Amino acid sequence: MNQRRIRVALLGATGSIGRSTLDVIKAHSDRFELVGITANSNSSQLAEIATQFGVRTAILTASNGRELVDRSRFPKNCEVLFGQDAVEHLASSPDVDIVVSAIVGAAGLRGSLAAVGAGKRLAIANKETMVIAGATVRKLAQKTGAELLPVDSEHSAIFQAIKSGREKEVCRVILTASGGPFRDFPKEQMDQITPAMALKHPTWKMGPKITVDSATMMNKALEIIEARWLFDLKAGQIEAVIHPQSIIHSLVEFCDGSVIAQLSPPDMKLPIQYALSYPERLDGTSPRLDLTTRMSLELIPPDIEKFPAIPLGLEVAERGGSSGVVVNAANEVAVDAFLNGKLSFSQIVPACRAMLDHHEFISEPTYEEITSLDDWAREETIKWMHLCC
């Protein structure tokens, strides 16, 4: 008897993670079936994906989505829907087994919560899901039996390495960071960084927002917060180191002093595939590590004066509650302003710090409070920029 293929919904199909996920599904079309896809406004690319994979549901979330769609470009049997309500319906559908959350930013939260609420396996590339609602997501997953599988290469590495022991034996986890394009840049010249300079990542090919996050190391701050909730750790158990080669994706130290690391060439298809196939490992399509050639692997402590996002992330992980919501929202606004020439590179993290320090802390925010704080932080960040710039 033929085994039914695993049905996948891909939220954020047109981004870099989405495209890598499509490569994995195509390579293992005998195991996975793409049944639903979403995009913000890229209607033409969404139609191409729907046609190539025979997708049954395609969703545009942009407010003017209906105006953007040429329905004739979509397959006749593909239902084209619009808005966040449609995303929630897809993510919780009984016709979906795994939801890949690859939407960038806070916009990915509603779909992630819908998947967890329905008891799905959630493959999390949208780190903001855990940054702004980590406690809520964990509690909901425990209630519904949903699986939280990381897609970030660093968290996938921790997830894999942590299997070498038991939870109570974990001493600390060490997230690695490439250091971005400015790891060797003079600290006194950080004010001179332009968007074009920040978008030249030395290792990874990512979207503009995530690439700037890597340059400020805010991505590592967000990953620290995500790790705290994803693996139920204390902030004091999480560290970050610079690893320019991007071969060691993270390390886990156990109570006996053993350190287990996961290594592979930098390619997002590997952690995506593992999140889809876990606990099974399938033949991979990613490049293999060539151990016949000489290489050096460096681990360098980060300069926290040059990259203040790291201590900020540790503080948010320690405080929990509403801290992640306001810092994430401020960062999204600040990065967008930087990319549009309205804010200097060195002011991105201070904008996040200002929102953290001035918001009214809530220890256990509800979903409504999370969305309200997100709106507040975005508005206040804009006001802060007008006063400081």
Image (cartoon, grey):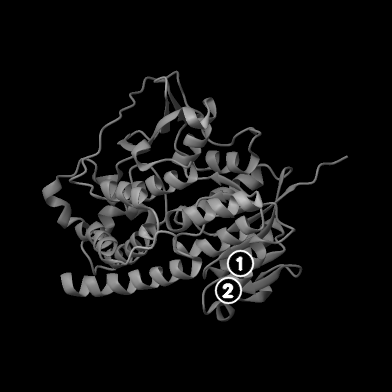
Which picture quadrant has residue 45?
bottom right
Residue 372 visible in image: yes
Question: For the residue labelled by badge 1, is the local secondary structure a helix, a strand or a loop?
Answer: helix
Q: Quadrant of the C terminus?
A: bottom left
- Could you tell me how far apart the alpha carbons at marks 2 and 1 are, in whole angstroms? 7 Å
Q: Do the residues labelled 2 and 1 touch (CB within 8 Å)?
A: yes
User: Residue 96 at what x, y percent from top left?
Assistant: 70, 56
Residue at image point 72% right, 43% down: 31
Q: Quadrant of the N terminus?
A: top right
Is 36 left, or right, of 196 in this rendering?
right
245 vs 229: above or below:
above
Question: For the residue labelled by badge 2, is the local secondary structure a helix, a strand or a loop?
Answer: loop
In the picture as drawn, the residue positioned furthest to the front comes out as: 363
Residue at image point 72% right, 63% down: 56
Is 192 left, or right, of 82 in this rendering?
left
Query: Badge 1: few (under 14), some or many (20 or more) residues near its Cα, within 10 Å?
Result: many
Q: Nearer the viewer, residue 249 or 366?
A: 366
Question: Dot 1 corresponds to which residue?
Answer: 87
Question: Dot 2 corresponds to which residue?
Answer: 83
213 vs 1: above or below:
below
Amino acid identity at mark 2: Gly
Amino acid identity at mark 1: Val
Q: Nearer the viewer, residue 117 or 52?
A: 117
